[in-house]
Amino acid sequence: MSKLSTSKLENDPAAWRGHDMMARDDWHVPINTTQRKELDSAIEHAKGLDKNVLALTKNDFPLPTLGPFLSALNNELEGGRGFVVIEGLPALELDEETGKIALWGIGQYLGLPAKQDGVGSLIHSVRDIGASVESTHNIRSYQTADPISWHNDGADIFMLYCLRAGKSGGESKLVSAVEIFNELVRRRPDLAETLERDFWFDTRGQRQDGARVEVMPVYNRHDGLLTANMKYRYIHTAQRFADVPRLTKRQRQSLQWAQDIANEPGMAMEFPLAPGDILVANNYVTFHGRKAFEDWEKLEEKRHMLRLWLTIPNGRPLPSCFKDSRIYGEAYERRLGV
């Protein structure tokens, strides 16, 4: 048995239980009236510059008091519980382009945007395009109305900005990846050890070099920290490739146990994102998911989120297996100053 798997991280502030968090309100981060006015003013200022959204800098988006407030959230995202929900931003009154300006400008105060796909997109619209992950090999879960199993995104953190909610369903789910590992160690240390070994991940056609899979563990112990990489759905879709090793019984068990533990009563958080909310979470210590949703019929009313991935200035050291990763390689290189 690996020594790594026998050591729990119960003193890590990122090891929490959902029922405890849902009883607290300190993860809700509302902006005040002054900060909202600053944000409205910054949006208008940025629009007046007539720049491409992706060319806007922090100087183009002045936030005298909101900016330092946002930057300070990084201390909670890395080294703290690992997530916050910013509340009270404009949403329903914004068109998509203005929403992107708002999210991009806010993001400038937390970190550097990171690429989210093979063509280098820095902002994604998260909405149902009527396709299926199972029937289309380059469609990703966020482009459907499906329930999304527990996973994490790329880069250090993700920001998910709700512009419009669906007709019903679609609640966000968040769970501590660290506490899931702790629970596996308590109950099945053999499965915890299995998750520290290599798995094959479907890249969904998003790598520029054409590689169809990436190989790395689900959990990595590095520099005294537990760093997770869970893509439950994409580990299974990678099995469509004949040259990918078949998942062993132990591997399937370990993945399923992690999902099942996350779904146990009291383990995860579940909450709706209202228009004007931004969920911000550390990808290395949290997994997130989503319930299936029913959407509105009119296009202008349909569920619409905007997503940004960022590397942050206080980001943790990353394991070497992340170096060649499509979604973590950029963060790894930035740590090295590349």
Image: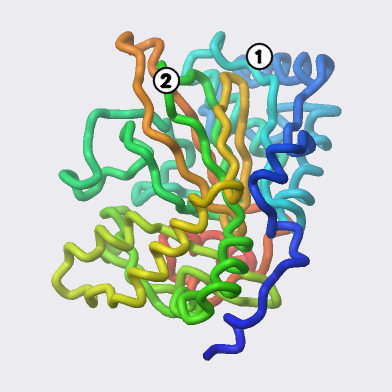
Q: Is residue 208 visible?
A: no
Residue 9 screen position, x and y as percent: 70, 70
168 vs 260: above or below: above
Q: Identify the residue shown where x is 49% and y is 63%.
A: 229
Query: Does 136 sit left or right of 32 as displayed?
Result: left
Residue ID for mark 2: 168
Label ID, residue 326: none
Of the pair 192 and 61, the residue shown nearer to us: 192
Identify the mark nearer the N-term, 1 or 2: 1
Of the pair 170 and 157, the residue shown nearer to us: 170
Residue 277 screen position, x and y as percent: 62, 26
The quarter holding residue 271 reads top right
Q: Identify the residue shown where x is 77% and y is 38%.
A: 24
Residue 249 screen position, x and y as percent: 29, 76
Q: Identify the residue shown where x is 38% and y is 10%.
A: 300
Question: Mark 1 against mark 2, which lies toward the viewer?
Answer: 2
Query: Does 65 sit left or right of 59 as displayed?
Result: right
Q: Residues within 10 Å of mark 2 (few under 14, many from 20)?
A: few
Residue 332 screen position, x and y as percent: 56, 66
Q: Circle 2 sits in a helix, a strand or a loop, which is it?
A: strand
Q: Identify the residue shown where x is 72% and y is 52%.
A: 81
Q: Which quadrant would the C terminus be assigned to in this image? A: bottom right
Residue ID for mark 1: 44
Of the pair 266 and 227, the residue shown nearer to us: 266
Residue type for callout 2: Ser
Tell me whether circle 1 and circle 2 mark residues in contact (CB < 8 Å).
no
Q: Circle 1 sits in a helix, a strand or a loop, which is it?
A: helix
Residue type for callout 1: Glu
Q: CA distance from mark 1 to mark 2?
A: 32 Å
